[in-house]
Amino acid sequence: MRNGDNVNENEDYLTIFEMYRLLFDILRCVINDSSIGQERLQGLSSKDWAALYAIAKRQGVTAVAFEKIQALPKELAPPRELAMKWMSHSMAIEKQTRAIYQRCASFAQLMHEHGLHTLVLKGVAVSQYYPNPWHREFGDLDCYLYKSDSGMVAWNGCYEEGNCIAEQAGYEVKRGHYKHSHINYEGLEIENHQFSLAIKDGKDTKALERHLRQLVEQQGGGCVIGDSMMCTPSADFNALFLTAHAMSHFLYESIKVRHVMDWALFLKREQDKVDWGSFWHWCDKMHYTRFVQCLNYICVHQLGLQIHTFAVEESEATKRLATRILQDILEGDSLYTKGYKGLRFRIALAASYFKSMWKFHRVYRHSALWLLAKRAMGMLVKEVRLE
């Protein structure tokens, strides 16, 4: 049994598995705005509740799960001490997320004052799909800068112009990576993207990068969030970008339950707005199809999501592969959460890469060694162009 965030080496895996089942039941209620079945909570011990809290924390859904936990009647609620700890953690997450959001909005305002629009990616964009956006944990801002004149979107020069604007305002900018720079904005780490994808991976990735830009251009830019100057991408953009982002994490380390929730809540809100014919075309081209089919299977069968715009793959092969992916999610840890840096991080990443060979063969359907060679060759290329 788990004690806090620590794992007893002799713990019963089935007990932990049942705790995960309970967590998914709670998240199902968040997605469908329903109440937790009382029969699922009867007989839970204080150790069970502690295990559930630790799992929710590990998977990045502490505050999201507490939305339903806090509504439980007294006789079914967790022990008072743990309930107070869970509530305190959830409130801290909400406070931190609000503060980060305000700094993100401040950065977007700074860019706007200099004629640039800020297209937000990942956490800030995805949080808008959650019942309570402040409960979706994120710690930085990923953005794409562009100009827009009468609905005409322009990208050229905006990346470096944004870097210079930040420097002139007194903020540190690091340009060490071709894909994005790092801007330290009032303690907030901002990844100012020159490219949303790792285009050194090859011509298909470059083609998808161009397609994503075209989607923004077709929309005339992003949709403004509230009264901020931040913009969110279209449903078609997010469908592909969220898939590419989750796939990369899955292949090279692991994804969390939070990533699955992102996809489920995105589908719940946006599935009617996505051009699924185009989406599946790109999935086939980029070798994402099996991964997405398995994510959809997990969302439907574990989180109770209702998908009506396309058929969910229900074959026995998909069920087995989805189960294997789910097991990887439950057992895996992100290297980024372990605090590894420098050489230690690179060694751990390499070890994770070889441990995850099955993902390349069974899910990605592509040679892991060939992709590794392509990435190694890409590191030797200094000048990167999208054309």
Image: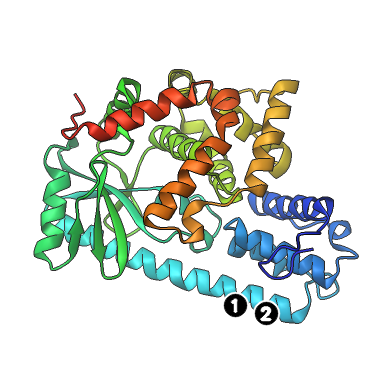
Q: Give the residue displayed 69% in from the left and 70% down from the top.
A: 4
Quadrant location of the C terminus in the rendered image = top left
221 with respect to 130 (left or right): left
Q: Dividing the picture into quarters, in which one does residue 139 lie?
A: bottom left
354 with respect to 147 (left or right): right
Instruction: Estimate the x, y position of residue 74 in percent, counting from the top left.
Output: 81, 76
Q: For mark 1, give the secondary structure.
A: helix
Q: For mark 2, give the secondary structure.
A: helix
Foreground residue, 58 or 166? 58
Q: Give the residue displayed 38% in from the left and 34% down from the top.
A: 237
Instruction: Estimate the x, y position of residue 366 in percent, counting from the top left.
Output: 49, 21
Q: Are marks 1 and 2 in contact (CB under 8 Å)?
A: yes
Q: Dividing the picture into quarters, in which one does residue 124 lie?
A: bottom left
Instruction: Estimate the x, y position of residue 360 in percent, counting from the top left.
Output: 54, 27
34 with respect to 47 (left or right): left
Q: Give the residue displayed 16% in from the left and 52% down from the top.
A: 162
Which residue is the site of mark 1?
Answer: 88
Which residue is the site of mark 2?
Answer: 84
Q: Is residue 143 above or below residue 248?
A: below
Q: Amino acid at mark 2?
A: Met
Instruction: Estimate the x, y position of residue 340 in percent, counting from the top left.
Output: 45, 58
Q: Give the residue displayed 63% in from the left and 45% down from the top.
A: 329
Q: CA–CA distance between discs 1 and 2?
A: 6 Å
Q: Would you call the spot at circle 2 few (<14 residues within 10 Å), some (14-19), or many (20 or more)?
A: few
